Amino acid sequence: MPEPQRPADRYGDRPFDRRWLIPIVVAGVLLAGLGGFAMLRVADQGVQWAMISFDTSAEDVARARIEVTRNPEANVSCDLQAVDIRQIIVGQTTVDVPPGGGRSVVVDVEIPLEGDAVAATIQTCRRE
């Protein structure tokens, strides 16, 4: 027995019009590219930082090595602190990372101390 046919005028069945296939695919590719470009622009504006190492063996200064990842054209300022065994701040400084170099820059920082430090931390880095 043959399969019954649905009345096209009743249910709105129409064959797919292939002339719209290429414009739909092109529009999808353009939207995906625009979304990817926007995500790269947003990601490019951020600043990331990490403590690579620190040395608190000297009495009057703590030495830290930090890595700052930012737009190479941006001027970045980072605030660092040194703390003692009770987590009391015994030293702090601000270091400027000038534009230039690569996206990631390693900076050596000296934090002047007013007590015995056991650790150094990066509080924040921001674009200036």
Image: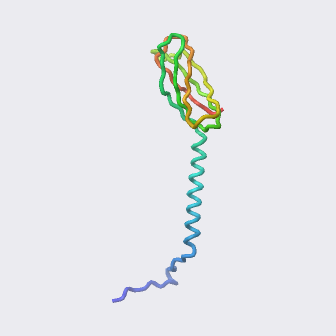
Residues 63 and 126: in front is 63
Residue at the spot x=56%, y=62% of the render?
28
Residue 10: horizontal and vertical position, in percent? 50, 83
Q: Is residue 68 above or below residue 87?
A: below
Residue reaching furthest to the front: 101
In front: 124, or 107? 107
Left or right placement of residue 50 versus residue 73 in this view: left
Residue drawn where x is 61% and y is 38% of the image: 71
Q: Residue furthest bottom?
A: 1
Q: Quadrant of residue 42?
A: top right
Residue at 50%, 17% in the rendered image: 83
Query: In the rendered picture of this protein, how many numbered marks are placed on residues?
Result: 0
Figure colour scheme: rainbow
Instruction: Tell me the residue at 52%/19% (across/down).
Output: 63
The x, y position of residue 52, in whole percent, is: 48, 27
Left or right: residue 75 versus residue 3 is right
Residue 23 occupies which quadrant of the picture?
Answer: bottom right
Q: Nearer the viewer, residue 2 or 46?
A: 46
Quadrant for the C terminus, please. Answer: top right
Q: Quadrant of the N terminus?
A: bottom left
x then y, percent, for residue 24: 56, 68
Residue 120 % position (x, y): 50, 21
- Is 28 rendered above or below residue 127? below
